[in-house]
Image: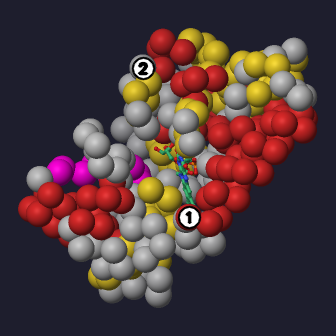
Amino acid sequence: MPKDEADLAHFLSATPDDVPVQVLGVASNTLVRDGGVKGVVVRLGPAFGQIETDSLRVTAGAAALDKSVAKTAAKAGIAGLEFYAGVPGTIGGALRMNAGCYGGETKDVLVSAIALDRSGRRQVMDLAEMKYSYRHCGASKDLIFTQAVFEGTSDAPTDILARMDAITEKREASQPIREKTGGSTFKNPDGPRGAWQVIDAAGCRGLRVGGAQMSEQHCNFMINADGATAADLETLGETVRAKVLETQGVDLHWEVRRIGERL
Ligand SMILES: Cc1cc2nc3c(=O)[nH]c(=O)nc-3n(C[C@H](O)[C@H](O)[C@H](O)COP(=O)(O)OP(=O)(O)OC[C@H]3O[C@@H](n4cnc5c(N)ncnc54)[C@H](O)[C@@H]3O)c2cc1C
């Protein structure tokens, strides 16, 4: 946990290139394999958690929680970031995943991001340099984001907060958000059907491998129902992919990041 950006830059410049460096937010989109992660795992702490507003802009550290950013923006009368109320991650994770929901995503509101490369050099990236597409960022995988600037539009705080509440209610009604889960397991495929629809059609709702299960409530959510290992979860995901390919002709792609070594 670096003390601040200068500390992280120093650490990166002093760490030999052959030492793997992995950054994590709050791991809401990450499955750590049972053999653990080789090398260094960086987590950004409180020094990277600040959130400030200025006119229609919000500047947030990469460790700030998406939900807190949505709330701060709403209170300042900045609309457009309310979708972050539904994403249980950090701004760093949101920048890397192009996180979004209910019609809004990171690329719609991002102005620029600050990142350190593997050598500790600081870069200011504009939106185009992030090379965003659906749940994907094409910027170099080595970058560690430390801060982001977003811009919204003007609206009454009460109206924005009401839209945030509506998002929260909708999620609580439709997703197993209190379970141990990584959210959507697979990205929505091209075509008219969402991931959950092809998974359902392939008969995988409720499917189990060991302690891992495709949720009965939302069948694109994988849950740790009963002491699942990472291997149970990954095998379940691959079983679902194979069944969906075989019966629906759709090749699903993981949205959940899998890191580390298998046992
Ligand atoms: C119940 C539930 C519901 C969810 N719903 C949604 C949803 O509606 N929409 C959606 O988009 N996602 C959703 N997710 C997934 C997840 O919350 C998002 O992908 C989120 O952006 C991940 O943030 P994180 O901080 O947890 O990232 P992590 O899981 O810690 O990391 C994810 C990726 O981002 C990288 N990363 C993290 N921090 C940084 C950084 N500072 N610099 C560079 N790279 C970094 C990691 O290396 C990793 O590759 C959901 C998850 C859960 C559990």
Q: Is residue 29 left or right of residue 159?
A: left
Q: Is residue 84 magenta?
A: no
Query: Could you tell me residue 244's position as x and y percent?
Result: 18, 61
Q: Which region of the structure is painted magenta?
A: 250-257
Tell me if residue 169 comes above or below residue 162 in the rendering.
below
Q: Residues within 10 Å of mark 1 (few under 14, many from 20)?
A: few
Tell me if residue 236 comes above or below residue 102 in the rendering.
below
Front in this rendered view, residue 210 or 47:
210
Residue that label 1 marks = 174
The quadrant of the rendering that contains the C terminus is: bottom left
Query: Could you tell me residue 82's position as x and y percent?
Result: 72, 38
Q: Is residue 75 left or right of residue 172?
A: right
Front in this rendered view, residue 50 or 217:
217
First in sequence: mark 1 vs mark 2: 2
The quarter holding residue 144 reads: top right
Residue that label 2 marks = 131
Q: How is the image coloured?
A: secondary structure
Q: Label 2 near label 1: C-beta < 8 Å? A: no
Q: Residue shown at 39%/62% (left/top)?
A: 220
